[in-house]
Image: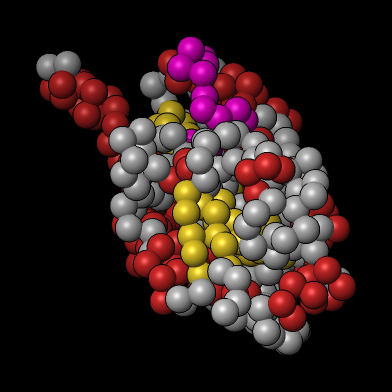
Amino acid sequence: MAAPFRVGVTRDFLKPDGSLGFGDINLGLLDTNPNVAWEFLAENTTELRPDQVRDYDALLVLSPRVSAATLAGAERLAIIARFGVGYDTVDVDACTRAGAILTITPDGVRRPVAHATIAFIMALSTRMFEKDRITRAGRWADRFDYTGIGLQGRTLGLVGLGNIGRDVINLIRPFGMRHIAFDPYTTPEDAASGVELVDLDTVLRTSDIVSIHCPLNAQTQGLINAARLALMKPTAYLINTARGPIVEQAALTDALRERRIAGAGIDVFEREPVDPHDPLLALDNVIVAPHALCFTDEVALGNGGSACRSILEVAAGRVPGNVVNRDAIETAAFREKLARYGGEVEGRRSKVEGGG
């Protein structure tokens, strides 16, 4: 009988009482292959250590970092399945050198993050949270000081037009907004219908709402800095559901405090968890969430199901979709691992979306 295909699931999926923080994440899919044995890692660490991963064929990872040090001596490991679309916490080159593929879950996160973005748009444009506060404070007469903005005819500008950005456009269409986007990797032919591709400065200057949907990488870190925030209209709103370091947080705090932009919806921060004494949190014109606005049963099942299916494909000796480091597929180390599971390298291609 073949040795079990061992899967390690990072322990940050669990609450302190041992229950799943997300609820059902489709781990039952792993039980459909009798040769797959899975378990939660014994410790919850911010960066995975070599001794935690070396005895596994696959890892299902939520938040811990996967570094070159993590993969030192991890000859057995064939796949790191990231629960989510971002992979800035994973050293992709180190994965390739170790003969391990990295997969993400763009279809699982697409609608939930788009849904979260729409929630921010609705809350900011109606000034919902400010009206909630004055109502609770008995300031009924002040309601005329908190007039929102209608969306009909307003401009929504996206920074990034990948999987999630396109879904935001699809969801917001009935509100009659104009749609523009900056994405250097998207051609006019590939852009969503009704979206005008423009440069980044044009997005910032002309949009009533700017929403960020690009991945975090060397090109996008600090992309929205003080100079670019200064381009925005004083009546405009900024939304970030992608990654915190894309926006210079101190510059955003200054712009909000000085009312140089009208407000912001922020689900992600430069450093997470955000310091509860961070001055951004003291402002009344920003809505914040703990990198969790998209956390719904839909994202749990979608991301978990996608990650588990990728793992099962490898366990069956096949190459899954949504592989980030496609170069790893051709390495001798990965080929040997697939051969061990009884399969052939199929060279299947898939489109990997950024953002979110």
Q: Position of residue 21 (x, y in %)?
A: 35, 44
Q: Position of residue 324 (x, y in %)?
A: 71, 64
Residue 313 lies in the magenta stretch = no
**Which sits in the foreground, 310 or 43?**
43
- Magenta extent: 266-279
Residue sitting at the far front: 1
Can residue 219 be seen here? no
Residue at figure coordinates x 60%, y 77% from the top left: 2
Q: Is residue 269 above or below residue 118?
A: above
Residue at figure coordinates x 56%, y 22% from the top left: 253
Residue at figure coordinates x 64%, y 62% from the top left: 57
Q: How is the image coloured?
A: secondary structure
**In the image, is 121 to the left or to the right of 271?**
left
**In the image, is 260 to the left or to the right of 111?**
right
The secondary structure that most of the magenta stretch takes on is loop
Q: Is residue 268 above or below residue 305?
A: above
**In the image, is 63 to the left or to the right of 204?**
left
Q: Determine the image quadrant of residue 134.
A: top left
Residue at figure coordinates x 55%, y 54% from the top left: 8
Q: Is residue 176 above or below residue 292?
A: below
Q: Position of residue 93 (x, y in %)?
A: 83, 54
Can residue 72 be seen here? yes
Tally the numbered discs: 0
**Which sits in the foreground, 306 or 295?**
306
Quadrant showing the N terminus: bottom right
Q: Position of residue 135 (x, y in %)?
A: 16, 24
